[in-house]
Image (spheres, rainbow, N blue to C red):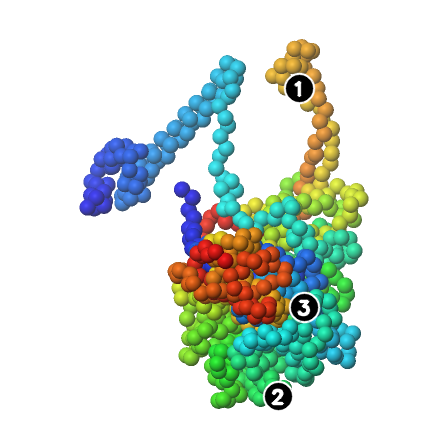
């Protein structure tokens, strides 16, 4: 009788996502079971508007995953993404050591490095941070204590990215040798991180046919593929999505106009040529950057500006969050909305944990992949504590879990293979209640905890 | 087949059609003959009128039966049959998970931290700047005069040809707390939109304005006393978005707990339309006779009693209009580079029972 058309959202495969919002809370959203609806599992941090998260970065590693969160009050906190403990805190002013330290400098970009290599030996982690005024700093810090004066492992290298203007977006390429910065009045520049030198600057396109010159205002940028640092996709305030090729020319190779509001996020896909673009009006679309063609829009009642998109490294899923307080999961191939979670505050970034597998009993390993375009959260808190990520519920069942703790890093959501008999070593987490006795095999010290792949839970006697 | 048959039949004879309909009544709703399928207009009108008459007769019978049953039950001393609640769109509204819950701590913290909290906590007194769009119209100024009398501490400035961004800068310098831009339709010279910008970099709400009735057009209107600040009634802003819009509207008016005036301004939200009304009220005591069916009174005294009740009498004054939220922008007004907290999209309208405020 009532004339309604409702499309039921199919559920999500097991996923774990971390979202940050303007009240400084970090919320963990998980999907349990094979296909289910996501629910908020944990909330970390007291709600406090002065601690609102500006950017975040996530080191998606099996061992020692780390979440770094840059807050509005000038602090950068490093959290353990498995249980939310603060492992270290750094103040922006210390890192940047600006002479005019009277002003608060907002962090524009934050990236955790060390995702590729294994940094298990030391308790330190390296991160790249850039403030809005243009000071970039590459630094390592020691983890393990949450006091604001964590000692620095080695001298930071600081340089000025731009003379004038505000840096609004930054990105680090897959091999972590190059970093990209852009902003309002700041043309895109690519820096070599080892030498801290600028290797390329973009040039703005000439005046258009009407003679109107639009000022440079980059709001989002990313390297197009993990292996190739030469191609860059960027979004401007003027609703343009541009492709730059470092090896070819300084002007944009392709420039696409998309709808009418500024581009807020650009994220690359794993195949190296597709990008997902989010605008200020809530439109989410995917483009093929080889041709410049719009592949399609993601339709799903998104009414607020999209602040962050994250691509899961294994499953064809993207997560988007924005000012309408919803976290949405989409299927990349069919562009269908898988599910939406209401999170009550304006969300600033979302990060996916790709090392999450949900077992029936126990917690899944969740690895978040940082696909947050501009922000990478540095989470180096738990280098030592290689936690087997588990969902909250299963933590209580540690005993059973250990058996079933062959956490599959990449759990296929449509099919879970049987567990192997390979022993899994668990990351020891100091805070975790997992009794050592139950561990099947533990290799040496905690540093060597490796997250095990958990496959379908099979109870094993550990 | 059946379709063809049905179509041919109306053309042939109308009587057949009615019989068909009656025979099929209650059985297969899908295949019931609708009067709208009859191609012949005269015949169609006849059939439709007959159907309507029958329906009305049926309805009256049912209502009478209900009333009789109720009376009978009362006389017999039994429980009357339960009153059935009619189905309304508000009753069957789609459940919305964004509804504010009373125990939500995040909501309170968010409220403390949002842009309106300073005004609502009475740290700042609101100061409103009212202006128009660039090309003025005849209805504009009249509406603006009325708005000036409704909202205390409001100032009107002519628009000139300033850009809105410049106006925002100017207002920030002069410490205004909000700007209201009244937008008129250039063709018909009618007011059709309202833009409320909260300063300093607060959210911008864009409303569509309709059904505007000026004070002179209201019968028996009253003249408000603009020196007093009005009491504010905000009805039915339940969701998070609605709550935020409600606070935006609340920040236009001064918050004074020691209230003395007799004016009330109401913003009533129903089905995403916000109705604005402005009244003067007075409390009076009125004597009414006690209901003679009250058995206790009857038995005790055996004569009619009078009861004094306190009622409020309202007199409408001021304009009357309806607003509908088109979009809520996160910063101040920025047509090109703005990001939206909420913007209406046609894909949201797929359900008639879904509302956002």
The residue lying toward the viewer, choosing from A374 and B163, is A374
Residues at marks 2 and 1 on the same chain: no
Q: Residue at x 42, y 46 (%)?
A: A3
Which dot marks residue B290? 1
Residues tagged by mark 3 and mark 2 found on one chain of the structure: yes
Above or below residue A272? Residue A339 is above
Are the residues at dot 3 and dot 2 in contact (C-beta closer than 8 Å)?
no
Judged by depth in the image, the label closer to the viewer, 2 or 1, is: 2
Residue B349, percent across and down?
Answer: 47, 54
Q: How far is disc 1 from disc 3 in space, using C-alphas?
A: 78 Å
The numbered mark 3 sits on a residue in which chain?
Answer: A
Residue drawn at x 46%, y 50% as measured from the top left: B351
- SS under mark 2: loop
Picture quadrant where residue A183 is located: bottom right
**Residue at 52%, 72% in the rendered image:** A266
In front of the other: A211 or A140: A140
For disc 1, the neighbor class at 10 Å (few under 14, some 14 to 19, many from 20) is: some
Name the mark on residue A195.
2
For disc 2, the neighbor class at 10 Å (few under 14, some 14 to 19, many from 20) is few
Image location of residue A236, percent across then percent down: 55, 76
Q: Label 3, on which residue?
A: A144
Q: Are marks 1 and 3 on the same chain?
A: no
């Amino acid at each position: 009788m009532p004339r309604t058309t409702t499309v039921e959202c199919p559920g999500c495969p097991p996923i774990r996502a971390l979202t940050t919002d303007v009240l400084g809370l970090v919320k963990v959203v998980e999907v349990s079971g094979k296909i289910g609806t996501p629910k908020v599992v944990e909330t970390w941090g007291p709600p406090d508007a002065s601690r609102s998260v500006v950017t975040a970065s996530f080191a998606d590693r099996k061992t020692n995953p780390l979440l770094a969160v840059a807050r509005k009050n000038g602090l950068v906190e490093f959290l353990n993404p498995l249980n939310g403990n603060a492992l270290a805190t750094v103040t922006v002013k210390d890192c940047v050591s600006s002479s005019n330290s009277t002003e608060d400098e907002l962090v524009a970009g934050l990236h955790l490095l060390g995702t590729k290599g294994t940094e298990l030996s030391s308790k330190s982690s390296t991160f790249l941070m850039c403030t809005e005024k243009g000071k970039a700093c590459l630094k390592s810090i020691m983890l393990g204590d949450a006091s604001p004066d964590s000692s620095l492992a080695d001298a930071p290298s600081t340089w000025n990215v731009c003379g004038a203007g505000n840096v609004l977006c930054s990105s680090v390429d897959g091999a972590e040798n190059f970093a990209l910065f852009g902003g309002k009045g700041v043309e895109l520049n690519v820096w070599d991180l080892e030498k801290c030198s600028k290797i390329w600057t973009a040039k703005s396109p000439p005046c258009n046919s009407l003679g109107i010159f639009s000022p440079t205002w980059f709001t989002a940028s990313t390297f197009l593929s993990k292996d190739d640092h030469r191609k860059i996709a960027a979004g401007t305030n003027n609703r343009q999505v541009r492709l730059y090729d470092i090896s070819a020319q300084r002007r944009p190779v392709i420039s696409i106009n998309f709808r009418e509001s500024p581009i807020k996020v650009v994220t690359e896909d794993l195949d190296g040529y597709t990008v997902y673009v989010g605008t200020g009006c809530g439109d989410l679309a995917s483009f093929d950057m080889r041709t410049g063609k719009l592949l399609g829009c993601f339709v799903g009642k998104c009414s607020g500006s999209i602040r962050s998109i994250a691509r899961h490294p294994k499953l064809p899923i993207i997560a988007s969050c924005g000012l309408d307080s919803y976290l949405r999961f989409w299927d990349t191939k069919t562009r269908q909305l898988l599910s939406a979670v209401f999170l009550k505050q304006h969300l600033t970034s979302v990060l996916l944990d790709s090392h999450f597998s949900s077992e029936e009993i126990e917690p899944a390993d969740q690895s978040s992949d940082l696909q947050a375009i501009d922000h990478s959260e540095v989470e180096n808190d738990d280098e030592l504590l290689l936690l087997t990520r588990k969902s909250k519920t299963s933590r209580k069942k540690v005993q059973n879990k250990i058996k079933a703790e062959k956490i599959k890093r990449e759990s296929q959501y449509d099919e879970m293979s049987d567990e192997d008999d390979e022993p899994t070593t668990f990351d020891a987490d100091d805070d975790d209640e997992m009794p050592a006795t139950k561990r099947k095999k533990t290799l040496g010290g905690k540093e060597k905890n490796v997250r095990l792949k958990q496959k379908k839970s099979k109870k094993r006697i550990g | 087949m059946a379709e063809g048959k049905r179509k041919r039949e109306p053309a042939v004879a109308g009587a057949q059609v009615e019989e068909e309909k009656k025979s099929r009544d209650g059985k297969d709703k899908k295949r019931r003959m609708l009067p709208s399928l009859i191609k012949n207009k005269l015949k169609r009108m006849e059939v439709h009128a007959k159907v309507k008459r029958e329906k009305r007769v049926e309805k009256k019978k049912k209502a009478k039966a209900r009333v009789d049953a109720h009376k009978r039950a009362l006389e017999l001393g039994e429980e009357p049959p339960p009153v059935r609640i009619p189905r309304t769109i508000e009753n069957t509204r789609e459940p919305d998970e964004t509804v504010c819950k009373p125990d939500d701590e995040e909501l309170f913290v968010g409220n403390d931290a949002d842009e309106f909290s300073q005004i609502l906590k009475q740290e700042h007194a609101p100061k409103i700047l009212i202006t128009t769009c660039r090309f003025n119209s005849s209805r504009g100024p009249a509406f603006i005069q009325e708005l000036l009398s409704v909202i205390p501490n409001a100032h009107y400035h002519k628009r000139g040809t300033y850009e809105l961004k410049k106006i925002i800068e100017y207002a920030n310098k002069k410490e205004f707390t909000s700007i209201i831009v009244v937008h008129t339709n250039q063709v018909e010279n009618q007011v059709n939109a309202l833009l409320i910008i909260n300063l300093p970099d607060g959210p911008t709400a864009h409303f569509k304005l309709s059904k505007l009735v000026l004070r002179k057009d209201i019968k028996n209107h009253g003249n408000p006393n603009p020196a007093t600040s009005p009491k504010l009634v905000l009805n039915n802003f339940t969701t998070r978005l609605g709550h935020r819009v409600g606070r935006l509207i609340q920040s236009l008016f001064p918050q004074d707990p020691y209230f003395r005036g007799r004016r009330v301004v109401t913003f009533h939200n129903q089905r995403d339309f916000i109705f604005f009304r402005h009244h003067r009220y007075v409390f009076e005591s009125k004597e009414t006779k006690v209901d003679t069916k009250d058995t206790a009174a009857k038995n005790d005294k055996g004569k009619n009693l009078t009861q004094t009740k306190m009622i409020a009498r309202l007199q409408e004054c001021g304009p009357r209009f309806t607003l509908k939220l088109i979009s809520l922008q996160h910063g101040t007004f920025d047509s090109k580079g703005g990001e939206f907290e909420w913007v209406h999209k046609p894909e949201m309208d797929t359900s008639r029972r879904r509302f956002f405020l």
